[in-house]
Amino acid sequence: MELAGRRSVVGTVVSRLLQAIIVVAIVTTIVFVLIHIAPGDPFTSAMDNPNVTEAMRARWRAMYGLDQPLLEQYVRYLSNVARGNFGWSFSMHRPVIDVLKDALPNTLLLAGTALVLGFAGGIGLAVIQATRPGSRTDRTLGAGSMFFYAMPDFWLALMMMLIFAYWLPWFPVAGAVDPVMHEYMGPLAALADRLKHLALPAITLALLSGAAVARYQRAELLRVLPDDFVRTARAKGLSERRVMWVHVLRNALIPTISLLGLSLPVLFTGAVFIERVFAWPGMGWVILNGVATRDYPLVTAGVIVAAATVTLGSLGADLLYSVADPRIRGR
Amino acid sequence: MTDPLLSVSDLRTYFHDGEVVARAVDGVSFDVAEGETVAVVGESGSGKSVTALSILRLIRPPGRIETASSIRFQGRELLQLSDGEMRTIRGNRIAMIFQEPMSALNPVLTVGEQIAEVVRVHTDASRHDAWERAVEMLALTGISAPRERASEYPHQLSGGMRQRVMIAMALVLKPALLIADEPTTALDVTIQAQILELLQRLQEQLGMAVLLITHDLGVVAEVADRVVVMYGGEVVERATMTELFEAPQHPYTEGLMSAMPRLDRDAERLVTIPGVVPPSTAWPSGCRFRDRCSYAWDRCATEHPPLYPVGDEHESRCHLAVEPLRRSESHTPLTVRVGADS
């Protein structure tokens, strides 16, 4: 039984990875077609210089192969990507792969921090609320989470910036590090500088995801609370705290895992606006710049990474599911 | 005579919903002596499970144990203990097992963890020692390969094994009192007998008292020393087991007796007590059983009967105790129906 279980897990992972590749391929195709049929190209929008003649533009287009039929461009792009070559970023004047290599760690840092803060905080608040449902604490926290849940992300980002960077100048307004001084700081000062820049965007993103987690987790806890085994736990002489954190939460966390899987893409897309507002040089910021300048290779590559993150995230959630729930593991 | 182990007196557990009050348990008194088995019998809605939960103070709002109630256990008034003191008694001195062994166990913890948790919470045993005691206790309940079973989850075990796990969890600290709320109702008949036997064997080995909550008089006849019959949130009859079976006094008890299927009688027809228990928000005036009672006369509507002594250690909450002649008079026997119709 143990062996059969393990084999089926491996089988699941393999088939889900194949599915992921197909999904990414389809998404790549759609994005490739969409961005090429969108009006303008890298040489119309970015170079409104009166000295640049139409003949020069045509020559540049030919240089980059943009005058070829779309199908041919697509096939060439795919064969390049298959060999690990994501092309040249027109707007950054660097290989796309280098642009992504710089941006991805920044996004992972921001989204990862926000994810941990948001889920830990949201689950903690939910437990406090569910311990005394209907109490004043419960209602106050519920109103608070509704407030942040309903708030548009870019608006919250602007308000956070206004309050905590402008009115109360506790945090830097934007960027991932101090643009001038960071280079000259010692290791400790450099770390402090990073954390100070990380705080506002991470807290903003954590508030948004934490509010959703708190609302969802509270409902799950209240669903589990009337179960018979909770009464058994109390009859064993456990403290209410232990009943809640060990017995109720362990069961109520299982559905939250799928929320975690779903949150990976939400954090990713949410981060587009948050990164934009805070000028955080991550994936969202890079992709948005790429779209604005019709930087075909950069946008397409960014979307490939996003699609891969989403599919791998949901696969990860499914695997976590089977770790958390012994009833699924047995099957 | 020494004090009884458990002494419940005038227990009232009400559920408040705005103006409406459900008087689920309404003035219940009984004792349990050390080492004996007392059965609390009644149908659904009689208040027997709420009585059991009240003893452990596991009643959740909007339920409330009213102030005049008293529950004394080993000389201490449980209703006056702080929540912390009460927790040192639950699962330790008084343990409880429940009807549904599937839903009463936590699905995401191994059964060993759930048993060892009791040891860890109430004693300063190490993680390893607690686990060993869990395994020992599983072995004592007759589970084969207890060490392997301890690492399994509830869904991997059969219903009978789960109830054995519940029993192991309840008895691992050798409580003085075990409250068993319908412990065999959800099980197959053959498994029922095994679990009852197991409970009796462990009771002898560990010397505990058992408060058995059940609707099944067959189970009562097997294990009980004394019986408390409940109806409408009240005790309606109290007697030793033999006395109750030989000479039931309350019409409700009589009804329960004749509703018991028996092999030595014509099995084509099942006797039932007509009607259902009235809602606890509106007990009838006078005797609460009168709407379903074939003896009922005008006194029953106006005067709420007290518990009349009707013999040695035998009491009945029925005016027949003082007007015995009415028993033979103009009395239509209990409705007899074909079993399949009911």
Image: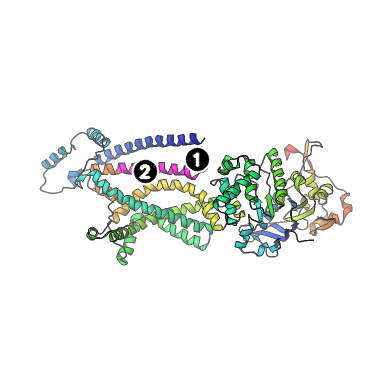
Residue A133 visible to the viewer? no
Q: Main secondary structure of the magenta part?
A: helix
Q: Which residues are magenta?
A: A303-325
Q: Is residue A264 magenta?
A: no
Residue occupied by mark 1: A329
Q: Position of residue B135 (x, y in %)?
A: 60, 46
Q: Residues within 10 Å of mark 2 (few under 14, many from 20)?
A: many
Badge nearest the viewer, 2 or 1: 1
- Residue lying at 15% horizontally and 37% vertically, measured from the top left: A62
Residue B253 in the figure: left or right of residue B77:
right
Residue B153 seen by the camera: yes
Tell me the distance, in whole angstroms, between the alpha carbons under discs 2 and 1.
24 Å
Q: Nearer the viewer, residue A164 or B182?
A: B182
Q: Position of residue B68 (x, y in %)?
A: 70, 65
Describe residue A276's horizontal placement relative to residue B191 as left or right: left
Residue under pointer 2: A310
